[in-house]
Image (tube, rainbow, N blue to C red):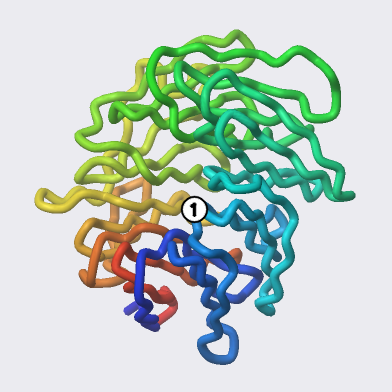
């Protein structure tokens, strides 16, 4: 039976993840908590708006309501790496070669590993950012679509148009597809070699969490009473195919998903605080945590695939060890 080590914090957990082997929780009040030889914490921002882990898994990149972008290591040491003045940092992305992107208003910024700063301006507010898996290519999500920018060259940006508000963006792990979350309870996608559209709709609620499976063959999402898992095995992605519906519960919504680092398994967090693991192949379910206080707001697996860290909207956090 999986064991749960609880951590009761005070406030909305915006981000739960790992820095190396260390569980880390970032709260909306700007505090970052670590489980490292006991419970450690520090005030990193005056209000936190977004957080991501660097691609090497060693540092937490955070953006704040204080207009600052910071990098915090597993020992809790923080350094400022960017600023947008008196605006809020609205979204972040960690990229290859140590690159970091952030946005405020209509401007997006990319900081390279050597400290060089590049900036890009959109016609509408930047709501989401993502780096392509290879090459320094940045995607933005905005009203009526998204834009692809080459960071290192002066090539013309490519506009991806689709009417409506796009609030987040992500590349598939193989770089062949770009997917956005929309305001209207749907996902939209583009097959990048020919810009063919892919529409993934029918959600009863807005998608707030998504996660690619280990080999990028599936995209798991929240926003329904089950985890909706879209197939991306073929060249057409999910076009004309039905998604899997995993971990269905009639009376609770899925609020967070996190795919296992190696296996086709997804951890699913629900609106009542329950966490379950479900295997794609046969829909076999394992209860990882019974309900708690508040909807699960963030989850992640460790690199070994034995522990799941979770946080809730009420600060009801913890670490699940599936080895018991």
Percent from the top left, x then y, of residue 193?
A: 64, 13
What is the residue that sits farthest to the front in this orientation?
86
Percent from the top left, x then y, of residue 69?
A: 65, 54
Report the side of 155 relative to 174 (left or right): right
Q: Residue at x 43, y 43 (%)?
A: 210
Percent from the top left, x then y, of residue 257?
A: 38, 51
Using the image as rendered, state which of residue 64 and residue 162 is in the foreground.
64
Q: Is residue 3 visible?
A: no
Tell me: residue 195, above or below residue 116. above
The image quadrant that residue 221 belongs to is top left
Q: Mark 1 points at which residue?
A: 49
Report the side of 135 relative to 188 (left or right): right
Using the image as rendered, state which of residue 127 and residue 89 is in the foreground.
89
Q: Residue at x 37, y 73 (%)?
A: 317
Tell me: residue 162, above or below residue 272. above
What is the quadrant of the C terminus in the image? bottom left
Report the side of 85 relative to 233 (left or right): right
Percent from the top left, x then y, of residue 159?
A: 60, 13
Tell me: residue 81, above or below residue 139. below
The kind of secondary structure element at disc 1 is strand
């Amino acid at each position: 039976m999986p064991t749960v080590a609880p951590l009761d914090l005070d406030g909305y957990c915006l981000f739960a993840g790992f820095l190396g082997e260390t569980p880390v929780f970032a709260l909306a009040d700007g505090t970052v908590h670590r489980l490292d030889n006991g419970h450690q914490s520090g005030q990193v921002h005056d209000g936190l708006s977004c957080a991501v882990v660097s691609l090497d898994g060693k540092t937490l990149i955070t953006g704040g309501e204080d207009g600052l972008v910071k990098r915090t290591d597993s020992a809790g040491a923080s350094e400022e790496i960017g600023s947008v003045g008196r605006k809020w940092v609205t979204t972040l992305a960690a990229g290859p070669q140590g690159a970091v992107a952030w946005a405020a208003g209509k401007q997006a910024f990319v900081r390279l590993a050597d400290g060089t700063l590049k900036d890009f301006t959109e016609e509408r507010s930047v709501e989401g950012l993502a780096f392509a898996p290879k090459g320094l290519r940045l995607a933005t999500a905005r009203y009526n679509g998204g834009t692809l920018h080459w960071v290192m060259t002066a090539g013309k940006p490519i506009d991806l148009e689709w009417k409506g508000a796009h609030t987040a963006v992500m590349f598939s792990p193989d770089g062949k597809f770009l997917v956005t979350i929309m305001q209207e309870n749907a996902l939209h996608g583009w097959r990048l070699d020919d810009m063919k559209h892919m529409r993934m709709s029918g959600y009863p609620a807005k998608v707030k969490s998504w996660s690619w499976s280990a080999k990028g063959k599936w995209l798991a999402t929240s926003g329904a009473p089950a985890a909706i898992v879209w197939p991306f095995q073929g060249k057409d992605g999910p076009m004309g195919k039905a998604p899997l519906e995993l971990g269905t519960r009639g009376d609770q919504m899925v609020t967070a998903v996190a795919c296992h680092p190696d296996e086709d398994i997804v951890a699913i967090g629900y609106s009542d605080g329950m966490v379950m693991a479900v295997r794609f192949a046969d829909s076999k379910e394992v209860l990882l945590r019974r309900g708690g206080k508040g909807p699960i707001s963030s989850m992640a697996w460790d690199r070994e695939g034995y522990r799941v860290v979770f946080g809730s909207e009420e600060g009801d956090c913890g670490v699940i060890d599936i080895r018991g």
